[in-house]
Amino acid sequence: MILVRTVAAVRDVVRSARAEGRRVGLVPTMGAFHRGHVSLMSRAREECGFVVVSLFVNPAQFNEAADLARYPRDEGGDAALAGNAGVDVLFAPDASEVYPAGFATTVEVTGITEPLEGAVRGTAHFRGVATVVAKLFNMVQPDAAYFGQKDAQQALMIRRMAKDLDFPIEVVVCPTVREDDGLAMSSRNALLDADSRRRATALSRALRAVERTVAAGEREAASALASGRAELAAEGIEAEYFAAVSVDTLQPVDRIESETLIALAARLGAARLIDNVIVRPPGATR
Ligand code: AMP
């Protein structure tokens, strides 16, 4: 695996790979790799002849300076993990390479970015993500790009952006990878102290509870969510949001009659965690 830091260098290696007829896969990340990231790299490795992983902690998508300052960073460890996962190129640009002096352009996806994370973190967050991912798509020019369902709203936004801006890139969304006790893997889990780490398992239990309630025949979103809220309350967790929303529009639904996204965000100690699950009532086709 090679490490490159400039747009010119990444374009160079991608051009050579494409000249050899290889399909190019991109996995955009902010580093501090865990098995969730590795699952994206492995999927890219299976489907592409050349795999680029980008590592850039994007200041533009952080709505709190403190959150950016304490975001976990471990480039050496990340390079080792990516190498073991069979990645060809680790692209780790400096902020000045991504946002040179005079940078003045943003990409904004409207509508689906407004509820959930958009409502809590503000409009700058998804604008920052859309802008940096659009830039990474243009810098690397991959055939396919890999994202995690863990960040469901982000994945939906990227799909929308790729379609709306005619990026000739297949957007692949991969399942959420979890710890044995159900906690969704996240770089932010490193910020949890022992007590918060234990309590954090209530998030996936809450989602499972909704899933079970729906599987047992409940159709009222409020009743289904109440079963999950009890799991959170048992650990003294008050969610920032815990919502049943349309998988396409992310607007709240009153009744769960088709595939529905159950999305959850909560603060535990120093970490803000998000998780989600898609529920489908028995008999529903979609
Ligand atoms: P991040 O470095 O947190 O920005 O994440 C980079 C990519 O990895 C994003 O597409 C995330 O959705 C994805 N990802 C993060 N955590 C997980 C997980 N537990 N399972 C699957 N994908 C994940």
Image (tube, rainbow, N blue to C red):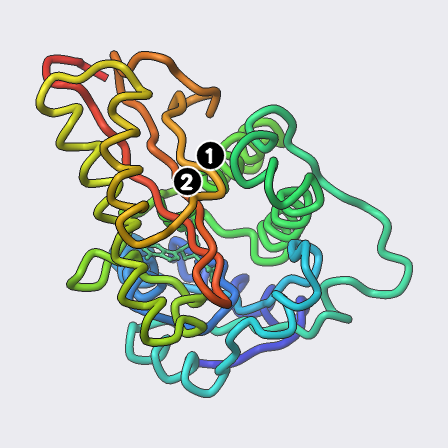
Which structural element holds mark 1? helix
Q: Position of residue 52 (x, y in %)?
A: 45, 65
| Quarter containing the N terminus | bottom left
Q: Quadrant of residue 188?
A: bottom left
Q: What type is the residue that disc 1 sits on?
A: Leu
Q: Quadrant of residue 217?
A: top left
Residue 156 marker: 1
Residues at marks 2 and 1 touching, judged by CB atoms closer than 8 Å = yes
Q: What type is the residue that disc 2 sits on?
A: Ala
Residue at 55 percent of width and 35 percent of height: 162
Q: Nearer the viewer, residue 233 or 162?
A: 233
Which structural element holds mark 2? helix
Q: Position of residue 280 (x, y in %)?
A: 20, 23
Residue at 41 percent of width and 85 percent of height: 77
Of labels 2 and 1, the one closer to you: 2
Disc 1: CA contacts within 10 A as few (<14), some (14-19) or many (>=20): many
User: How far, Cα to Cα, is label 2 from label 1?
Assistant: 6 Å
Q: Nearer the viewer, residue 123 or 166?
A: 123
- Ligand 1 quadrant? bottom left
Judge from the rendering whether residue 205 lies leftward or rightward of residue 16; answer left or right.
left
Judge from the rendering whether residue 171 lies leftward or rightward of residue 102; answer left or right.
left
The residue wearing badge 2 is: 152
Q: Position of residue 117 (x, y in %)?
A: 54, 41
Disc 2: CA contacts within 10 A as few (<14), some (14-19) or many (>=20): many
Residue at 26 percent of width and 21 percent of height: 223
Judge from the rendering whether residue 91 lies leftward or rightward of residue 174; answer left or right.
right
- Considering only vertical position in the picture, is 117 above or below 197? above
Q: Quadrant of residue 220?
A: top left
